[in-house]
Image: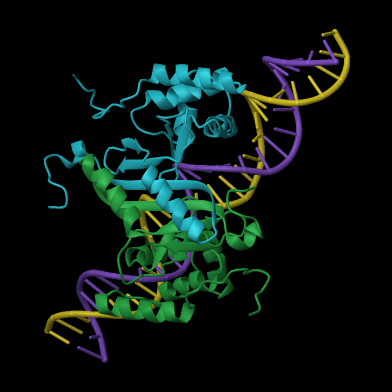
Chain colours: A cyan, B green, C yellow, D purple
Amino acid sequence: MTLSPDSCHPLSSDPRQALEQAEILCQRRGARLTELRRRVLEIIWSNPTPLSAYAILDLLRDDGRQGGPPTVYRALDFLLGQGLIHRLASLNVFTGCRQPDSRHNGQFLICRDCGQVDELSNPAVEELLRAEATARQFEVLAQMVEVLGRCPDCRGGETPYAG
Amino acid sequence: MTLSPDSCHPLSSDPRQALEQAEILCQRRGARLTELRRRVLEIIWSNPTPLSAYAILDLLRDDGRQGGPPTVYRALDFLLGQGLIHRLASLNVFTGCRQPDSRHNGQFLICRDCGQVDELSNPAVEELLRAEATARQFEVLAQMVEVLGRCPDCRGGETPYAG
DNA sequence: TAACAATTGTTATAAGATAACATTTACTAT
DNA sequence: ATAGTAAATGTTATCTTATAACAATTGTTA
């Protein structure tokens, strides 16, 4: 398998599959996946690393499309609301959701060097946090778990915790 | 105990104590807690809720101090580097660290309604994430765990998960 | 097809963060 | 003491991220 210089670790999930699933989910929910929204989702899935709102805007303009920042942010809000994408708060970027059918709080491994993101969904983490919250009578609305570090490729041959 | 309208749940830790400890830690490390840095830390600790960089800047100017955004951000960088404060990425705000002596990744319960923050440090959460990362040959550099929700006071008498 | 709601476009601006360089302050070695 | 140096702060400008307010368009429904 040959890799392009820009994507040393391509996403496991297929953009086409993600878009198909998005169509189905939106139809089922009576949500309108308009051309703009679909295109924004496509852009996000087509890029090997998460994109900022303004990077998405630039790509939309490459399509010849009009519109300013609000256009993008509204599309992103829709996609976030449908659970089709996640926002990585630590980097102000957006990434496609790998399990859009089950509502969940994303857990992410973010590579500092190449920007590549791996999405986890470890129920134990979620439960632990929920337990901590409950013990403090705190009602959980959303969880944000982002681990910053270096992915295997960017670490090269290094052994973990040895250097 | 009487509460001011602005702080329905005051921080458990005492600002004075936090500043004293900061002095000690910096001295021990040979780090210079200058007047500006000390004042920024004091401002952060004196507020019942986390503050944005620009809110801190406004308060510095109330002191009669000169300086622009870089002045604040540099002080914040120093304090972050010393582990004396945390940055909440989901809100772009800064809050005092309750365990500045032990290096750790903060875990936070953030109230959506009043902005109040509770800091956890559950080693199990950290270990779980580290295990997930290690299983993927991912080297962990930092962890960000932020739980957004509603604190007991803002929930009033509601029972958890019943409304 | 008129009326209404939802979506998108447009303009302006707010909010968060940093780059580049000048000035001041603190430390070091004579 | 004081010149030289490094660290910290001040200053100006600019960049990135995000939203407010309103106009135009598109889609839906009666």
Question: Where is residue A66 drawn, in percent x and y?
Answer: 57, 23
Q: Quadrant of residue A36?
A: top right
Q: Residue at x 19, y 19 (%)?
A: A2
Q: Residue at x 14, y 39 (%)?
A: A156
Residue A61 in sight:
no
Question: Where is residue D28 drawn, in percent x and y?
Answer: 72, 15
Does residue A63 lie above or below A120 as drawn? above
- Seen from the viewer's position, the closer of residues A143 and B100 is A143
Does residue A114 lie above or below A3 as drawn? below
Residue B26 in sight:
yes
- Seen from the viewer's position, the closer of residues A102 and A42 is A102
- Seen from the viewer's position, the closer of residues A78 and D30 is D30
In this image, B19 relative to B114: left or right?
left
Question: Where is residue B34 drawn, in percent x and y?
Answer: 38, 76
Q: Quadrant of residue B6?
A: bottom right
Does residue A81 lie above or below A129 as drawn? above
Q: Residue at x 12, y 52 (%)?
A: A162
Does residue A1 lie above or below A153 as drawn? above
Q: Quadrant of the N terminus of chain A?
A: top left
Question: Where is residue D9 drawn, in percent x and y?
Answer: 42, 70
